[in-house]
Amino acid sequence: AQKVTQAQTEISVVEKEDVTLDCVYETRDTTYYLFWYKQPPSGELVFLIRRNSFDEQNEISGRYSWNFQKSTSSFNFTITASQVVDSAVYFCALSGDNAGNMLTFGGGTRLMVKP
Amino acid sequence: GAGVSQSPRYKVAKRGQDVALRCDPISGHVSLFWYQQALGQGPEFLTYFQNEAQLDKSGLPSDRFFAERPEGSVSTLKIQRTQQEDSAVYLCASSLTSYNEQFFGPGTRLTVL
């Protein structure tokens, strides 16, 4: 069975602070994909990144960066110089490498960025 | 629009009523997924279609839940004899193929009184 754990249920930071959202996963698959989605107050899940289990290179996209550590089964997400518009619930998710690729989501981390 | 659309956005039903939730995927996307998101939790998988074929319905919580995608495009999730525990946001997602990332619609918030 697959499982995703986001231990931080809620984080509050002041604008311009850096913040890291933790994600730990469990899977028996040798090939799998990891995802981060953002859910703003409007409710729509916005795709941020997909990472293949064979690619452990860190990725940076603007103020966003992701750190994939297979040894610790973690896929953490860092926002640099946070902004109020970053306030949302962030979900980490996992899928296997099979047809269908249903997503298994963590419980989410609510990020509040205060001005 | 180019994204996934869902209707209605909000639905209030009395306990025991039947409801139908619609999903219009991104044009050309082969795969379509339904998820249920309870308040304060992450989405949970309900069912998956590849074109018109329902290949996985392991997440449907009971036989009151039924989904279809007869022409391989629009999908409908039907819930019969709704119960209070069915209250949730129902999210639809589509992907180009089953190996691509999923794009989500805005969801339908169902409230069963």
Image: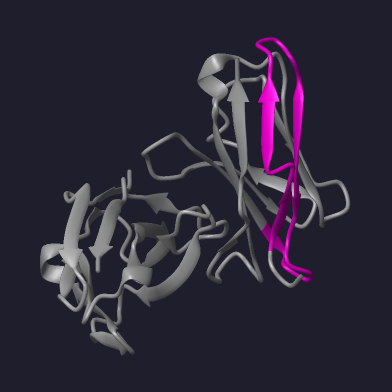
Task: Quadrant for the N terminus of chain A, please.
Answer: top left
Write down the region rendered in magenta: B4-31
Q: Is residue B22 left or right of residue B89?
A: right
Q: Identify which residue, B42 or B57, lies in the foreground.
A: B42
In which quadrant of the rendered view does residue A72 lie? bottom left
Q: Identify which residue, A108 or A115, lies in the foreground.
A: A115
- Tell me the residue at 60%/64% (across/down): B98
When the figure is inspected, residue B73 is found, relative to residue A19, above or below; the finding is above
When the figure is inspected, residue B75 is found, relative to residue A13, above or below; the finding is above
Q: Is residue A51 visible?
A: yes
- Tell me the residue at 36%/38% (across/down): B40
Q: Is B83 within the magenta?
A: no
Image location (x, y in percent) of residue B27: 79, 69
* Residue situated furthest top in the rendering: B16
In which quadrant of the rendered view does residue A73 lie? bottom left
- Tell me the residue at 81%/52% (across/down): B74
When the figure is inspected, residue B14 is found, relative to residue A51, above or below; the finding is above
Q: Is residue A27 visible?
A: no
Task: Quadrant for the C terminus of chain A, please.
Answer: bottom left
Q: Identify which residue, A114 or A93, lies in the foreground.
A: A114
Image location (x, y in percent) of residue B8: 74, 41
* Residue situated furthest right in the rendering: B71
In which quadrant of the rendered view does residue A93 lie? bottom left
When the figure is inspected, residue A112 is found, relative to residue A62, above or below; the finding is above
Image location (x, y in percent) of residue B4: 69, 61
